[in-house]
Amino acid sequence: GTPFLSVRDLKVHFPTPDGVVKATDGLSFGLERGRTLGIVGESGSGKSVSSSTILGLHRGSRAMVSGEILLDGTDLLSLSDEEMRLRRGREVSMIFQDPLSAMHPYYTVGNQIAEAYRVHNDVNRKQARARAIEMLDRVGIPQPDRRVDDYPHQYSGGMRQRAMIAMGLINDPGLLIADEPTTALDVTVQAQILDLLQDLQKEFNSAIVIITHDLGVVAEMADEVLVMYAGRCVEYGPTKQILTNPEMPYTWGLLSSVPDVTGDTDARLVPIPGNPPSLLNPPTGCAFHPRCTYRDKVPGSLCTTDLPELTPAKSGGFHVRRCHLPDPAAVYAEEVVPEMQ
Ligand code: SF4
Ligand code: MG
């Protein structure tokens, strides 16, 4: 049957005076409740645009959106703005990298969490406040009955992210989208927040989409991984297979640039050369070709002329990759792995 979340051929295009920016260009994936999908890519790969479209945040912008976003069988793209507003926060919610910019500075943390609850539930202020305190306690805020009346700036970065998670989960949504939820935090706090998300996922049985540039976060959190490049999926599969048998040179680059075990997120062992492409004028053929050092292994000039299809990877299951190499698994084992050691 159809998975709980099913995204089919999602396209999000933005018209600009210089042409159409194809931020997401044909994205498909599925996710069950209780499972976590990591969407990975550099900034400008389309990962944030895709996830905020699931939340309906493109509405009111000039984005041209097509495809399907089925949540529990309902196509979110077919809903009216009002119907989508009713589902946002109740059936799907989002936590952001920077809670300070997502929270209102002049309202207490407790008021904001209580309000997120009151919007979707027939409760009075007192009941909503009690529920906010309960959620603050659940996400590990000390003395929640006192801290509920603090303003966001009185919280530490880690506490704000906990409060944001409390707000995101207060209505028990089936789907939680977390966009770089730990990027701004130091490594110890980051690990605590990821642990918290995993605990809460077990309790709430939510599907989680975690957007990140960090494969370390993916390794820790995700059951499944989707690698995005220039608005397209370039590799997708179970986390274990992506981490041990990746079949796309861009993924190899990401893997070799995972921070070392000291957790220094600036430590790039082998950076991917060059920059992410412009989504306005992406390269022809395989969008990764200007940065790819394996092109000479592909016959002719396919890499620069033809967009590779997503094709099944050697490791099986639903693992697919987009690359013209005749046998990427062999290249990875014989050339990439020895280089990384
Ligand atoms: Fe590299 Fe060609 Fe594969 Fe693209 S299709 S990743 S350019 S080898
Ligand atoms: Mg982003």
Image (cartoon, rainbow, N blue to C red):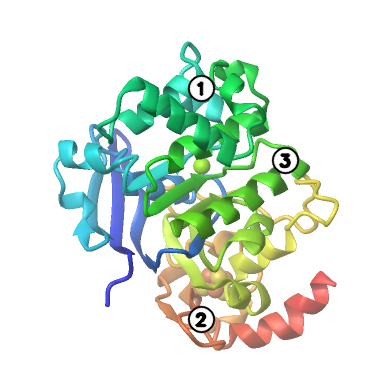
Quadrant the N terminus occupies: bottom left
CB atoms at circles 2 and 3 under 8 Å apart? no
In the picture of the structure, the residue carrying the numbered disc 3 is 189
In the picture of the structure, the residue carrying the numbered disc 2 is 300
Q: Position of residue 146 (x, y in %)?
A: 60, 19
Quick one: 16 or 113, which is closer to the camera? Answer: 113
Q: Position of residue 141 (x, y in %)?
A: 63, 32
Measure how far apart labels 2 and 3 are at the Cα level.
49 Å
Q: Earlier in the sequence, mark 1 or mark 3?
A: 1
Label 2 crowd bin: few (<14), some (14–19), many (20+), radius 10 Å:
few
Identify the mark at residue 109; answer none if there is no mark: 1
Left or right for 335, reference 141? right
Location of residue 182 (image quadrant): top right
Q: Give the number of the mark in front: 2 or 1.
A: 1
Measure how far apart labels 2 and 1 are at the Cα level.
60 Å
Q: Give the number of the mark in front: 2 or 3.
A: 3
At numbered mark 2, what does the secondary structure look like: helix, strand or loop?
Answer: loop
Q: Give the number of the mark in front: 1 or 3.
A: 1
Q: Which three-letter amino acid code belongs to the residue tagged 3?
A: Val
